[in-house]
Amino acid sequence: MDNSTIINVLQNVYKMLENRGFDMTKVNRNPPTAHLDHLIKLFRDRKNTLDIMIENDNQDKPNFGKKVYVHFIHNLRNAKSNKEFEELYDVVTKAHNMMEKDHIIIVVFDDLTEKHRSLEVEFPNLTLFTYKNLMFNIVDHEFVPHHESLTAAEKIKLLSDFMIKDYNKLPLISKFDPVCRYYNFKIGDVLRITRPSDANKTYVSYRYVQLLD
């Protein structure tokens, strides 16, 4: 795998963090080429030179008060086991005092299996991506509408507006939907989905995030 692929994935991770509402002003998104090449060389030797840690202290950002840690893995030690991910999750959580509200992202320059994905149910603040998922930003596609999670107050108001008693009356969307994974929407979230329609108007719908088969 050449450096350009790793750089492309890295830039798309920066964009994803920005889209998740994290303050990217403290991240050097365009380091000198020679320096970046050196970091990638160390990364290939299993050093954590590409990892990203952000504490969101910008009150203007949607994820104010939350943290995100991104870890990159060049090759898995044992592709058939979840042990490497479980140990890494435990280390990151303890080292950075990560809470369930915070985000932990692991990007693997290797293949992932459904067994690996099951960890996202066990650890709701974890998302796993193979580099192939991040060769482009899915939310930039013209046919992907805007998704956003409702606040607690908005969720309560929606029940009244729709005259329903629980969110199961809404259409469902899987936690493993690519857009849900991109933003790390969690089971129990209610999403507002806005898409353009005719005559320069917008069409708004709502989905309830659940674990679907």
Image (cartoon, rainbow, N blue to C red):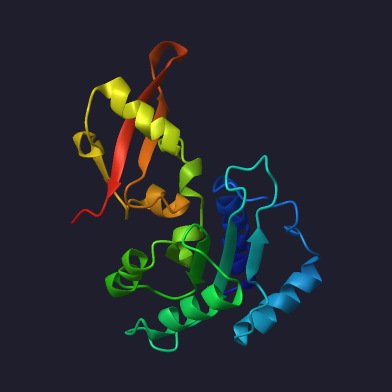
Q: On screen, 200 above or below 90?
A: above
Residue 4 percent location from the top left of the image: 63, 66
Q: Residue at x 43, y 79 (%)?
A: 85
Residue 79: x and y in percent read: 37, 83
Query: Image check: 186 left or right of 25?
Result: left
Q: Where 32 falls versus 109 (above or below)?
A: above
Depth order, front residue of 171/109: 171
Q: Which residue is found at the position 37% from the left and 26% from the top?
A: 157
State the image coordinates of residue 149 (x, y, percent, origin top left).
Answer: 43, 40
Q: Is residue 90 left or right of residue 40?
A: left
Say which quadrant the C terminus sits in.
bottom left
Residue 126: image x %, image y %?
A: 44, 65
Pick whichever, 71 or 151, lies toward us.
Answer: 151
Name which quarter of the figure residue 184 lies in: bottom left
Q: Nearer the viewer, residue 113 or 87?
A: 87
Q: Is residue 150 visible?
A: no
Residue ranking furthest to the top: 199
Please state if 84 lies on the left or on the right of 11 as rendered.
Answer: left
Residue in view at x 39 percent, y 49 percent: 180
**Which residue corresponds to the image point at 54% horizontal and 48% vertical from the top-left?**
20
